[in-house]
Amino acid sequence: MQRAERPGWGLLRHHQRHSNLLTVGAVRAFLRAGIVLAGLIYQTAATAGAFLIAPVRIPLSAHERTAVLTVRNDSAEASVMQLETVSWSQTEGEDRYAPTREILATPPIFTVPPGGSQIVRVGLLRPPDSRRELAYRIFLQEVPTETRKEGEVRVALRFGIPVFVAPAGQAPKPLLAWRAVATELELGLLRIEAINRGDVHVQIAGFSLSSADGAIVARQNEMKYLLPGQGHHWMVKPNQALPSGVKLKIVARTDAGEIQTEVLPER
């Protein structure tokens, strides 16, 4: 039996409005009672293998302390899934995870029948931070089962769902700082750095670099989350020589919208 980890994302936005602040006790009651919440809005969906996971990201707040996650099995065989909730931090741009009891996802293990689906209930068990967004992930691990055919290899999938808890105060905005450094000059490479100086995450879906005349000289399509206070860098090779003292325009695609800025490459 072999395992391989690969991401799978579906898309289902969950939208709730609560007039009163839910307590931790109310969250636990919600999870125990198995109440199916209304207000689910389907926008689009994508599958990984034979699974659809929805939503791709869960927003929580002081006024929206619960959410639901749907796992659908489009295969011809039943599948056993196990949940793990972790806190999510970053060190020098690298993801770090640790077990947590600050959020709860239930049931912790379940079987999804062929063509069936399972509702997972998610609850926040701590107050939101007063200033900075909190980040978690819910990992769904497919438990491998014995293969039915000789020589058949069953791949166990692992899905990671981000959970973000908005700060209790006024909603902060992302704040990205960009920098370009000409490095390894003999290879013509540029080091593009982005630092999230805000108090909420930013998901960068990619960016382009253009010269003063508007011509695009490089693109980067790597998707990356930057948590508050964290940064990341990319090495890009422009498709033309860049003269000294000329600014470059960066146009970044993010979950907060398009961000444009200019940088002067350092040498």
Image: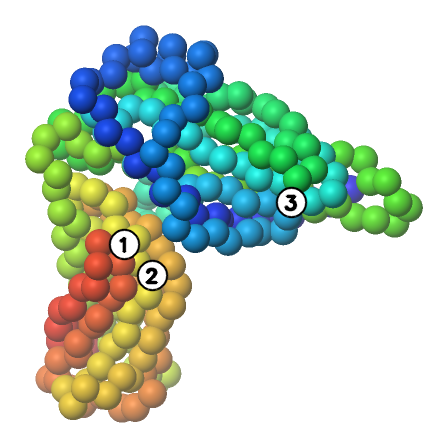
Task: Assess whether mark 2 and mark 1 are in contact (beta carbons under 8 angstroms).
Answer: yes
Q: Is residue 24 left or right of residue 214?
A: right
> Which element carries disc 3, helix, strand or loop?
loop
Q: Quadrant of residue 136?
A: top left
Q: Residue at x 34, y 25 (%)?
A: 66
**Which residue is pictured at 51% across the width and 29% down the height?**
119
Taking depth in this image into account, of 217 and 104 the one nearest to the observer is: 104
Task: Determine the residue positioned at 38% across, 26% down.
Answer: 37
Residue at the spot x=10%, y=30% of the render?
Answer: 169
Residue 192 in picture, x, y percent from top left:
26, 68
Q: Which quadrant of the structure image shows residue 162?
A: top left
- Can residue 88 be seen here? The reply is no
Which structural element holds mark 2?
strand
Q: CA distance from mark 3 to mark 1?
A: 29 Å
Look at the picture and state if 150 lies above or below 32: below
* Residue at the extreme left of the image, as rendered: 170
Say if 252 sits above or below 45 in the image: below
Q: CA distance from mark 1 to mark 2?
A: 8 Å
Q: Mark number for residue 205?
A: 2
Q: Amino acid at mark 1?
A: Asp
The amino acid type, in three-letter code, at marker 2 is Ala
Graded by Cα atoms within 10 Å as few (under 14), some (14 to 19) or many (20 or more), the crowding at tag 1 reads few
Count up the numbered dots.
3
Q: Is residue 103 left or right of residue 217?
A: right
In front of the other: label 3 or label 1?
3
Of the pair 257 and 99, the residue shown nearer to us: 257
Residue 256 image-quadrant placement: bottom left
Q: Which residue is mark 3?
A: 74
Question: How far apart in space, not on screen, are marks 2 and 3 (Cα)?
Answer: 28 Å
Q: Which residue is mark 1?
A: 255
Upstream in sequence: badge 2 or badge 3: 3
Which mark, by number, is residue 230? none
